[in-house]
Image: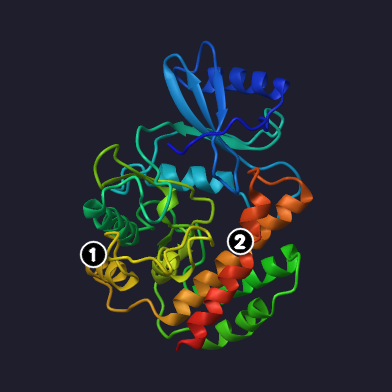
Amino acid sequence: MPMHEKAPPVLNTAQTQALQTWLGQHVAGAQGPMHLTRIHGGQSNPTFFVDFPECALVLRKQPPGPLLPSAHAVDREYRIQRALANSGLPVPKMRAFCADAQVIGTPFYVMDKLAGRVMSSHALPEIEPAQRQAYWMAMAETLATLHSLDWAALGLSDYGKPGNFFARQIARWSRQWAASRTREDTHIERLIAWLPAHIPKGDDTRIAHGDFRLGNLMFHPSEPRVIAVLDWELSTLGHPLADAAYSAMAWHTPPASFDGLLGLDLQAQGLPTQAEYLAHYHRCSGRPDRVAPFHLAFSLFRFAVILEGVRARALAGNAAAEDAGRVGDQSAAFAQAAIQVLDGV
């Protein structure tokens, strides 16, 4: 699992005691002394290891304070991962969901804690160079598997609105920008005007993870194999090329901007190019269409707005992580990267 920090806990003593009681009543094996540890790295829903003598869990909850509409939907995270349990896509086993905010201040869910690795960087410094490309290709294969699933057969027909995905998403994230903006950004304004007028023809609806990136995958302890796809907060029914483009954003920003790959000697470090990564996704998915500049610009725009929301929560004092202000400040870099994609067309 990800590294954890010694930051002050989000839960107070009374909430921690209430959590222990609730888990003891709803989760098999969750008895005896409880050890609660905040997981470092997440910028949205606070996440914890919850360890008992005979049970190891992960808890995800909403952050405290006022939230943007439809944001931090832990109920949706829990629902989709339960639906995917026997689909062939690896996800943790869901154990219980609590809608009662009186227990720890917000709704939350718990799932099994897995033994694996979440990579620290897109450059994969912990992996031997000869093995690095295999990890990125495993990521592409996992995304193709997700997009092959029959969402209706999995009971997810009402999980989103089929069709017209990009028009609805551009409108949604434009509203989110208006609701969370803390600064002026001419790049964002240009994207809000450009994107609706350049939506590619054709449509498709698949399960879209919404935040499919290397840091949201757990790999086998020693093999280039994905054992769990994590963090489903932004999942919906959507266009698969939105996920594919989003997963390729690292090639558009430098290491200083959310750990990008731009400017690195990819060949020397054993890392694939964006073209190689996306080609493998397309081979595995069998899709006739391809990720285009529109999809990349849309994904970079969307992530810029997400990061602006992180910055807004940091300024409001209800961010999920201590470094939220620093992370949120990178919103402008992603808006600029989206404009560079457009200018290269």
The answer to which of 187 and 113 lies nearer the viewer is 187
Most foreground residue, 74 or 300: 300
Label of residue 284 in the image: 1
Residue lying at 72% horizontally and 20% vertically, measured from the top left: 14
Amino acid carrying label 2: it is: Ile
Above or below 10: residue 87:
below
Between 227 and 224, which is closer to the camera in this rendering? 224
Q: Position of residue 70 (x, y in %)?
A: 64, 56
The disc placed on residue 306 is 2
Residue 111 is situated, as x and y percent measured from the top left of the image, at 46, 33
Label 2 CA crowd tier, 10 Å (few <14, some 14–19, many 20+): many
For the residue labelled by badge 2, is the local secondary structure a helix, a strand or a loop?
helix
Count every numbered label the image shows and give the total: 2
Quarter holding the C terminus is bottom left
Left or right of 239 in this view: 24:
right
- Asked if disc 2 and disc 1 are in contact, CB closer than 8 Å, the reply is no
| Res. 69 in view | no
330 over 23 or under it: above or below: below
Residue drawn where x is 44% and y is 49% of the image:
216
Callout 1, which amino acid? Answer: Cys
Q: Is residue 197 visible?
A: yes
Tell me the SS state at disc 1: helix
